[in-house]
Amino acid sequence: MAARLPVRPKAKAPAKSKKKGAMKGMTVKGGHKLSVKAGAGLTEKGRKAINKKTGSNLKAPAPNGKPGTKEGARKKSFCARSKGWKGERGKAARARWKC
């Protein structure tokens, strides 16, 4: 009789992301987000709320980041990542970052 191979345990299902649904309940009226007219994006209150919910480390926009600095690298990364944003809020956020 042939030797049987040991049975491997099944892979565990990945844990649910803390970040999914983090924006739920965040409103302009509640003071978490800026209006489109004001440049879209999150307010200080909104960033603190999301950081608390998800353990993130969101920072304020860096529109004046100089090339070669940490702030400049953040600005470059944001502008590259948000290049395809075509919605009203996305365009306003990009304008606020001076992309």
Image (cartoon, rainbow, N blue to C red):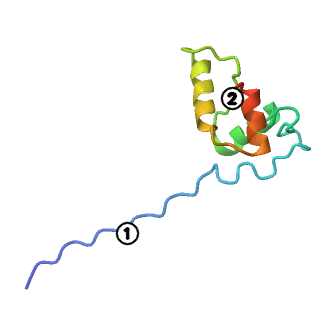
Using the rendered view, name the quadrant where residue 6 is placed.
bottom left
Residue at the image position 79 percent from the left and 31 percent from the top = 44
Q: Residue furthest right?
A: 29
Mark 2 Cα-neighbour bin, 10 Å: few <14, some 14–19, many ≥20: few
Q: Secondary structure at mark 1?
A: loop
Q: Is residue 64 left or right of residue 42?
A: left
- Camera-near label (1 vs 2) is 2
Q: Residue at x 60, y 19 (%)?
A: 72
- Name the residue: 9% across, 81% down: 2
| Picture quadrant of residue 91 | top right
Quarter of the image containing the C terminus?
A: top right
Residue 73 horizontal side relative to residue 99, left or right: left
**Amino acid on which the number 1 mark rests in the picture:** Lys
Identify which residue, 21 or 28, lies in the foreground: 28
For mark 2, give the secondary structure: loop
Q: Is residue 93 visible?
A: yes
State the residue lying farthest toward the left.
1
Q: Badge 1 local density, few (<14 within 10 Å), some, or many (20+)?
A: few
Which circle marks residue 10 in the picture? 1
Residue drawn at x 87%, y 43% is 28
Which numbered tag is attached to residue 59?
Answer: 2
Residue 86 in the image, given as x and y percentages of width and height: 71, 44
Measured from the top left, where is residue 89 in percent x and y?
Answer: 78, 42
Sequence order check, earlier mark of 1 and 2: 1
Which label is found at residue 20?
none
Quick check: 2 above or below 88? below
Mark 1 to mark 2 CA distance (whole Å): 40 Å
Work out whether 24 lies above or below 97: below
Find residue 62 and report its horizontal and vertical position in percent.
69, 22
Instruction: Please say whether residue 41 is visible from this viewpoint.
Output: no
66, 11: nearer the viewer: 66
Quadrant for residue 45, please give it.
top right
